[in-house]
Image (spheres, helix red, strand yellow):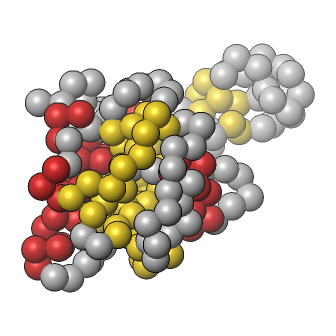
Amino acid sequence: MNFCSNCGTETTRRIPEGDNRLRDLCEECGSIHYQNPKIIAGCVVLKDQKVLLCKRAIEPKYGLWTLPAGFMENGETVAQAALRETWEEARSTPKLDRLYVVSSIPSISQVYMLYLAFMNEEKFESGPESLETKLFQIDDIPWDELAFHTVRDALKCLISDLEKGAFRLHCIDREEAPLTKVI
């Protein structure tokens, strides 16, 4: 940050008194400008043991499959963000069951919060950010066409839980950035 968003004065970068991290500071008005991780909210949507995936119509990862998810907006809860993103990307309104996967990726300052959700009826279509939406049988998931590690991780959790017959909360910490090419 070069200039204070409160008063427009040039900022300096230093550790504020009582803190332990470098921050952008305004010496004029005293503002401390914190930079915090972005929250990505979405759903792992199931219908009759099939999972809903969306083919991305936007960058990054245009043309690859993902779960319906996106950046949380100010003024909404994580659950509201997950449902909004699922509607925007897949025109689906599933019923939320529980928080299902929380993935932290400190290297890119993102936290993914995915809910387990169930469709009552098989109703969905592509939203403006999706080229295609589809329910996949677990055996037909396009593993080498997935957009992000977080998607792969969540689907592996889903498969494991389906095999065990019970869903649980999964917390995943990743140190590396998502793959650019799935291997």
Farthest front residue in view: 122
User: Looking at the image, which is closer to me, 87 or 156?
Assistant: 87
Tell me what residue is drawn at x 11 percent, y 30 percent.
Answer: 183
Image-quadrant location for residue 8: top right
Percent coordinates x, y for residue 166 in the rendering = 20, 82
Percent coordinates x, y for residue 122 in the rendering = 43, 66
Q: How many marks?
A: 0
Tell me what residue is drawn at x 31 percent, y 60 percent.
Answer: 51
Percent coordinates x, y for residue 110 in the rendering = 44, 43
172 versus 48 height, above or below: above
Tell me what residue is drawn at x 74 percent, y 58 percent.
Answer: 75
Percent coordinates x, y for residue 20 in the rendering = 49, 43
123 versus 103 height, above or below: below
Does 98 sit left or right of 15 as displayed? left
Does 173 sit left or right of 37 as displayed? left
Q: Which quarter shows the N terminus?
A: top right
Farthest bottom residue in view: 166
- Report if residue 31 is visible in the image: yes
